Image (cartoon, coloured by chain):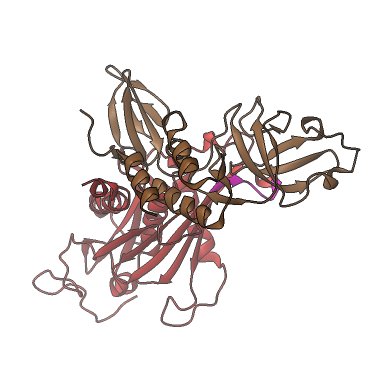
Chain colours: A brown, B red
Amino acid sequence: MKKEVRDVVLPSQLLGDTKKLKAGPGTFVENNKIYAETLGIRHIRDNTVSVSPLKGFYQPHTGDIVIGVVEEVGTSMWLVDINAIYPALLHVNEVPWHVEFGDTARYLNYGDVVLAKMLPSSESDRLQITLKDRTLHKINGGMIIEVEPTKIPRVIGKKGSMIAMLKKYTNCRIFVGKNGRIWVEGNPNAILKIEKAIRLIEREAHTYGLTDRINALLREQ
Amino acid sequence: MKSDIKLIDKEGKRLDGRKRDELRPIKIEVGPLYRADGSCYIEWGGNKILAAVYGPREALPRHIQHPLRAVVNARYNMASFSVEDRKRPGPDRRSTEISKVISEALEYVILTEQFPRAMIDINIEVLDAEAGTRCAGLTAAAVALADAGIPMRDIPVACAAGKIDGQVVLDLGKEEDNFGEADLPVAIAPRTDEIILLQMDGHLTVKEFDEAIELAIKGAHVVSELQKKALLAKYAVAKEVKQ
């Protein structure tokens, strides 16, 4: 039987012994003892203890779909803010258009929003994104809702169940970027409804039975 | 400074009625600032201090970037209205020094190697001062860092001890600091009891020094529990949600 609430741990809180458990992400080992490194939720799965942060910044992984805002335009590339520690590089070779040298601003300018994919990078601080995929494009219209990146898995739900439900009740188009940005387009009232639901998800992300409560919220409106 | 003020009365009570090893009342609030990544407000006796954390984010200007780890940039600042006589605003020798020692203390516990070329900004704003602002500021900054979700080896905590009227006491108040014989702020990493900040003003014998450090560390552990309670109070709210 599952417990009602997931365990909140503080940084430097003792989680266990390396003899019994393996140290997963969000933990560190000192003198054969495992400690939490951030404020977060403790998980124990397959003898591995890990901590998923409650708050924090987006940690990029190859292949993630993200929503970025162009913050700098160069002659052969753009720098895109993707909510990570460092801005991501979007090279002209990685866009579906043929861009003449120095003509970058005609295609993407400051403040433009793109749905992009993370490219593999050798170092964690040199991020690169691409628009070369049929599903990726520049975003026009709609609205962006920002949430804590750590809560995105809850917004998506198990196999996309939460998103499917939001779409079903509101008839909106929704894209969820792994970096904590959610793009919504549709009826203004429906967008407000979605934002309300998303804020509830964000607030109660670490509790069980969330899908049912969101379902109830959407139905009563 | 010589004075006629009796800092400890015959019954061993101090000016504000505290015992030798008693702290001033402390109140810690997590996350009062919406725009900051993490924040904390602390009231420690008459001190009122706000701490805000921004980052990790790309370190700018570029030349301060470190290719292998993040730089920790704490800024201690006293508001012009925080003391009785108006303080001339802006950084001065004293606040530059405190910023430096707090930066180095916090850098030691933060896992900076996870964020190459990044910078973590910590702003400590003293709104009201009554002795022991660097300890209270560091304590608040530590809570704000945890609130920002920054990976840390420990939640640092600070507390001062000192000597007044020939006795070693905990957590000096304003008059005790001004007219006492010594002040010894200590910051520790409470899990391992490592000392990460140690300064001294005044004179102590070796024996008194040992006694003062022990007292300060004991006091710091009490404050550490308050820090943890404040953090859990904000984030364990969810415990009641589902009931």
The residue sitting at 39% across, 29% down in the picture is: A28
B95, B239: nearer the viewer: B239
Q: Is residue A11 visible?
A: no
Residue B10 position (above or below residue B201): below
Residue A25 appears in the rendering: yes
Q: Position of residue B232 (x, y in %)?
A: 29, 48
Foreground: A170 or B198? Answer: A170
Residue located at (91% from left, 38% from top): A100
Where residue A125 appears, as percent x and y from the top left, is 63, 34
Task: Please give the count of numbered marks on the rendered protein.
Answer: 0
Q: Quadrant of the N terminus of chain A?
A: top left
Which percent across, then down, holds residue B59? 63, 46
**Location of residue B66 in the rendering, given as x and y in whole percent from the top left corner:** 63, 39
Name which quarter of the figure residue A29 lies in: top left
> In the rendered view, would you say A49 is above or below B9?
above
**Segment tinted magenta in the rendering:** B55-62
Q: In the image as oriented, which residue stretches furthest toward the left?
A: B11
Q: Is residue B43 magenta?
A: no
User: With B224 as the anchor, is A99 left or right in this view?
Assistant: right
Q: Seen in the image, is B137 located left or right of residue A96?
A: left
- Any magenta on residue B57? yes
Q: Quadrant of the C terminus of chain A?
A: bottom left
Q: Toward the viewer: A187 or B36?
A: A187
Residue at image coords 51%, 53%: A190
Kindly identify the residue that appears in the image at 58 percent across and 41 percent down: A84
